[in-house]
């Protein structure tokens, strides 16, 4: 597929939306609407048998949701993934990690967004004050046992696809299944 034209139709501090004209392999024309956001980092803070979750109001859903701390830098700035992970953990929970280990890469919604995320395991946890951004003022954080977290997934209390996929990466890591080496451009 070849892009023949691209135009930005919307932009704010967190994302842009563009419409691309494309030519498919068979020569037919088409369009794609694409949401561009910077890559994000997601952090699984693990302390013994507990994981730290944050709960916040997710405006597009119109409800509060529990998930692992995650996010991007404001103003669509690209930040080194490990640095971003440490920052998101500190901002959203107040936690600091002695070690951050990358577990893998997730694509958010490959059919409509270019955004990708890197999942980190945070260990050697120490507690401090959170440093939440204006949009995160209603956020709260709490520790849950892994059994509680798994129950929250099966009961529908945790529905965040990135958090559920990240937990799968943690389980594979614990089973000794290595994450594949990042592809060029990752």
Image (tube, rainbow, N blue to C red):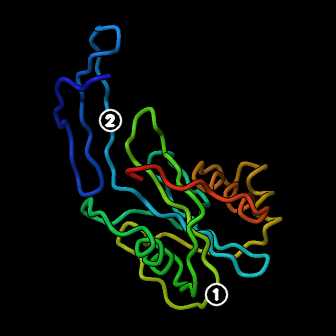
Q: Is residue 77 left or right of residue 173?
A: left
Residue plotted at (18% across, 37% down): 8
Residue nearest the observer in this picture, 131 or 2: 2
Residue 65 coordinates in the image, percent (x, y): 59, 57
Residue nearest the observer in this picture, 9 or 82: 82
Q: Please tell me the numbered disc located at residue 152.
A: none
Q: Is residue 114 left or right of residue 74?
A: right
Q: Is residue 89 left or right of residue 34?
A: right
How far apart marks 2 and 1 lie (CA) works out to 39 Å
Q: Pointer 2: what residue?
A: 34
Asked whether the beta carbons under mark 2 and mark 1 sit within 8 Å of each other, the answer is: no
Q: Please tell me the numbered disc located at residue 124.
A: 1
When the figure is inspected, residue 141 is found, relative to residue 163, above or below; the finding is: below
Q: Secondary structure at mark 2?
A: strand
Residue nearest the observer in this picture, 132 or 177: 177
Q: Secondary structure at mark 1?
A: strand
Residue 22 coordinates in the image, percent (x, y): 26, 21
Q: Is residue 182 left or right of residue 154?
A: left
Residue 78 coordinates in the image, percent (x, y): 30, 63
* Mark 2, other Cα within 10 Å: few <14 / some 14–19 / many ≥20: many
Residue plotted at (53% across, 78% down): 93
Residue plotted at (57% across, 52% down): 162
Residue 169 coordinates in the image, percent (x, y): 67, 57
């Amino acid at each position: 597929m070849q892009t023949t034209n691209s135009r930005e139709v919307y932009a704010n501090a967190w994302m842009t939306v563009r419409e691309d004209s494309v030519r498919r392999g068979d020569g037919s024309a088409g369009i794609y609407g694409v949401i561009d956001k910077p890559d994000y980092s997601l952090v699984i803070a693990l302390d013994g048998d507990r994981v730290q979750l944050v709960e916040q109001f997710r405006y597009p859903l119109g409800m509060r949701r529990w998930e692992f701390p995650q996010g991007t830098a404001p103003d669509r700035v690209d930040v080194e993934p490990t640095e971003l992970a440490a920052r998101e953990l500190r901002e959203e929970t107040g936690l600091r990690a002695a070690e951050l280990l990358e577990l893998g890469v997730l694509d958010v919604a490959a059919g409509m967004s270019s955004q990708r995320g890197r999942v980190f395991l945070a260990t050697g946890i120490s507690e401090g004050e959170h440093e939440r951004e204006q949009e995160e003022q209603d956020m709260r954080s709490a520790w849950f046992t892994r059994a509680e977290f798994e129950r929250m997934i099966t009961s529908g209390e945790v529905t965040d696809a990135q958090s559920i996929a990240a937990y799968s990466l943690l389980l594979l890591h614990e089973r000794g299944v290595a994450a594949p080496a990042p592809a060029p451009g990752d």
